[in-house]
Amino acid sequence: MTKQSIQLFIAVMLLVLVTLFWPAHRAETNTSGADAKHDAHAEDGGGENPQEKKRKIKYWVAPMDPNYIRQEPGKSPMGMDLIPVYEDEGEKSAEGVVKIDPVTVQNIGVRTASLSKGVLEKKIRAVGRITYDEKLVEHIHTKVSGWIDGLYVDTTGEAVVKGDALLSFYAPELVATQEEFLQALAYRDRTAASGFPEIAEGGRSFVEAARNRLLFMDVAPGDIEILEKTREVQKNMKLYASKGGVVINKNVIDGMQVDPRMELYTIADISRVWVIASVYEYELPFIRKGQEAEMTLSYEPGAQYKGRVTFIYPYLSTKTRTVEVRMEFDNPDLKLKPDMYADVVINARSGTSTILVPSEAVIRTGSRNIIVTALGKGKFLPKEVTLGLEGEGFVQVLKGVEEDDTVVTSGQFLIDSESNLREAVNKMLEAQAAQPLSGKEDREAMTQGPSSRSPVHLSDAQKNLITVLIGNYLKIHAALISESGPAIAQQSSILSDTLKKIKASTPKGTLKDVIASAEESMPGLLSEDLQDARNSFKGLSRAMVDLVRADGREEALSSGIKIYFCPMEEERWLQKGTDLKNPYLGKDMWICGTEEAL
């Protein structure tokens, strides 16, 4: 081993030892420093270091429970030291603005995006059915009655071109019209040399009238010319195809008697076809005539056909809740067969240019839509917005933000929660400032949300009725969670009967205020409308919380009742157990809430 190798080995080992022992040494140093700081704090009666002296403490909060707030240092319910929140941390620089430490912003993975105006694009996918272009379908009839005397096209599916003979037939009326035409020709020839111009012109008029009758009977102009040259009546006349295509229906056989009411052939030109697709109601605002459509077939992988939207049907299917859209596609190779199924994509665009925001940036609460905007330097502002159409990962914002705003696309739920929490804390502190408290017990009572009434002595019968009332209330809470309007109304009717019994048991009005507040909530709870029931349940919950914190505290504690607070609605409710279920925000926000002391 060379000298240089030995030196390199020693250096590596020293680096390893420093890596292993330095964090422990640093932790010990920090711990001892913290102990020294705590001792200094104890000696000077709560003094702060010079840096902290420049910052004013707004309130103290529990490390593990942000809802446990005090105006002075102390211990949390879990036995941990309360930590200070300074005014420059807790205050808002403007209405609704929340400031978050840049390190925290980075830790929660906040991502932002700049807004811009544009036309919303959306690819509408549907299953289409290929059918005939109705404008290229021809039905073949005779104009006179007769008998089929020969078929030139005698199979379904046979291709024909314009001018092909389809059949020949005998019709007495047609024979008579030919004879009239020949007589008109003879009369014209006899009067052509007449010295009277009127007579010569009359002969020509007779010929034209007879010729037109033959044309009206679908006699081909070429057959009329042959008749004029040969001057011989033809027993059988031919019927020709006026359009090219494929015979899709044949109702005639040789020797058959026919009349004008009978459809002899149906011929369809499939060089262009229609595709009918069904789109849902919410996709209709995107559909316009003339939009480009793409079609693929399962039996022809890789092939793509391009067409256009030509018609949107003006009615809706009541069974499928869809509207049919018609598209036209060229079919030069006749690969597209009617009644085939195809996958269709319509490249749709919204009509006007609006502000577009990524869909992931929107917080949907059910009753409103929130977008968190980034103001820079760790400041964020939640804004309520009005949304429009949505497609391809973007949604239109009709109202609430400006074009030059920057929105948060990741981590916005945590920022919005922080904003709601700070708003609740600020309102709590404002309430405390408006109503100064005396003593530590009063401050704790204000934080916990006490009853505004003083407890009164209740009889055993009244206590039993309160227990029944709480049970009725919990059943209404369960019905709200299941979002069943009839169940809410049924349980509310039972609770109303219990209120009447309590009212009758308190002639002196000891529970008058509580009963009156609860009775005011009954119309909304009995309406079977879910939103009205939720709003009315707030008033009922206020009365019940007031009741259990005063007169019914003993009954509530014995039955395991807990009080929870919803920071988004700023309302409380009663519930059993720890399985949190918020009755105000629906199934998507069940777990929004914090427990309060009874």
Image (cartoon, rainbow, N blue to C red):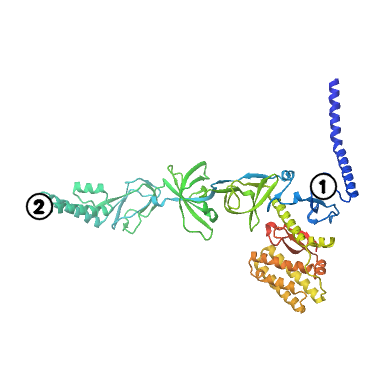
Along the line of sight, which residue is nearer the eye, 117 or 378?
A: 378
Residue 18 at what x, y percent from top left? Answer: 85, 33
Residue 226 at what x, y percent from top left? Answer: 22, 46
Q: Distance between the residues labelled 1 and 2?
A: 132 Å
Q: Is any part of residue 411 visible from this angle?
A: no
Task: Point out the image quarter for the N terminus.
Answer: top right
Disc 2 residue type?
Phe
Q: Is any part of residue 335 visible from this angle?
A: yes
State the image quarter where residue 206 is shown.
bottom left
Within 10 Å of disc 2 (Cα), the crowding (few <14, some 14-19, many 20+) is few
Element at label 2: loop
State the image quarter where residue 26 is shown.
top right
Element at label 1: helix
Residue at the limit of the structure toward the left, as seen here: 195
Along the line of sight, which residue is nearer the eye, 539 or 312?
A: 539
Labelled pair 1, 2 in contact (Cβ < 8 Å): no
Disc 1 residue type?
Lys
Within 10 Å of disc 1 (Cα), the crowding (few <14, some 14-19, many 20+) is few
Along the line of sight, which residue is nearer the eye, 232 or 371?
A: 371
Residue 166 at what x, y percent from top left? Answer: 33, 49
Q: In this view, does 561 lie to the left or right of 378?
A: right
The residue that mark 2 highlights is 196
Total tally of numbered discs in the picture: 2
The residue that mark 1 highlights is 53
Task: Point out the image quarter for the C terminus.
Answer: bottom right
> In this rendering, which labeled residue sits more in front, label 1 or label 2?
1
